[in-house]
Amino acid sequence: MSLELCPWGHLSEERLREFLTDPLNNQNAPDRKIVIDYLGKNFVKLGFLDVGCGTGHQYIALKQSLMSFDYCGVDKTEKMVEFARGRFPEAKFIQGDIHKLQFQDRSWPVVYVRHVLVHLPGYIGALTEAARVCSDCLIICLLKPLADKQQIKVVGEPPDQTKPSDFSEHYLNTYKREPFMGAIKNLGFDVVMDEMVEVGGYFESYELIIARRHSPDTARGQT
Ligand SMILES: C[S@@+](CC[C@H](N)C(=O)[O-])C[C@H]1O[C@@H](n2cnc3c(N)ncnc32)[C@H](O)[C@@H]1O
């Protein structure tokens, strides 16, 4: 299946402006607060790579935390990157694909991937690449918690890529717990937090996973 199936690039200006601005997803989302709290307790200065950064809500969350950080947001969708740059001209946002990140091995102490993996055809390539560039702390938030069975689900009909469409058709996968956790371990990480964050509504809960490298390198900003 095509990696282009998600119609991210077709969001209208209006949808882009309101993209994930609801309380369960914006800068004050409950899972983001847990992440900020964890980072505040474990890092003095952060090197933070936000993969699939969207319009930059995590950048605001970091700014609000008053932590000292070095941030880069990466997103495959040009429109998202342009919008984020317009919002935060002082920050670095670049276009890039989670399957082929333009960074050296272990070059970022914290790599954050929120609500991206369930929207891809699968997670192995993306997870492996996120882990490759991570020197210490890999943070993954899943819109659909891990489960007993894997379900690769496409919601609605595949969009016509030649026309702007509303944002209703996208992957909404559920991944099987055991192989997902096994992959994190095999990539050289130990899970230090695996929390169901109750959010209510349609999704009920997000799964937040924080994993640390078995042997972290001394890298930018790490305590
Ligand atoms: C649901 S949004 C989440 C945005 C952000 N992480 C947040 O939680 O606010 C998913 C984002 O992943 C981006 N994305 C989708 N496929 C991607 C890929 N292959 N590489 C990088 N980003 C991707 C989309 O453009 C979109 O901005």
Image (cartoon, helix red, strand yellow):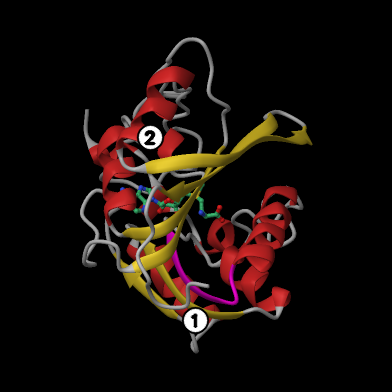
Q: Which residue is more in the foreground, 114 or 67?
A: 67
Compared to residue 48, the image places residue 9 above or below, namely above
Residue 120 tag number = none
Residue bearing mark 2: 185
Q: Residue at x 54, y 67 (%)?
A: 56
**CB of residue at label 2: within 8 Å of ligand 1?**
no
Q: Is residue 154 above or below residue 98?
A: above
Left or right of residue 100: residue 90: right
Residues in magenta, as a range = 43-51
Looking at the figure, which quarter contains the N terminus? top left
Quick check: is the Cβ at mark 1 less than 8 Å away from ligand 1?
A: no
Question: As shown in the figure, which amino acid type bears the numbered disc 2?
Answer: Lys
* Image point (71%, 53%), residue name: 34
Say which label, 2 or 1, has the lower sequence index. 1
- Residue 218: image x %, image y %? 37, 71
Q: Which residue is mark 1?
A: 86
Q: Position of residue 90 (x, y in %)?
A: 50, 89
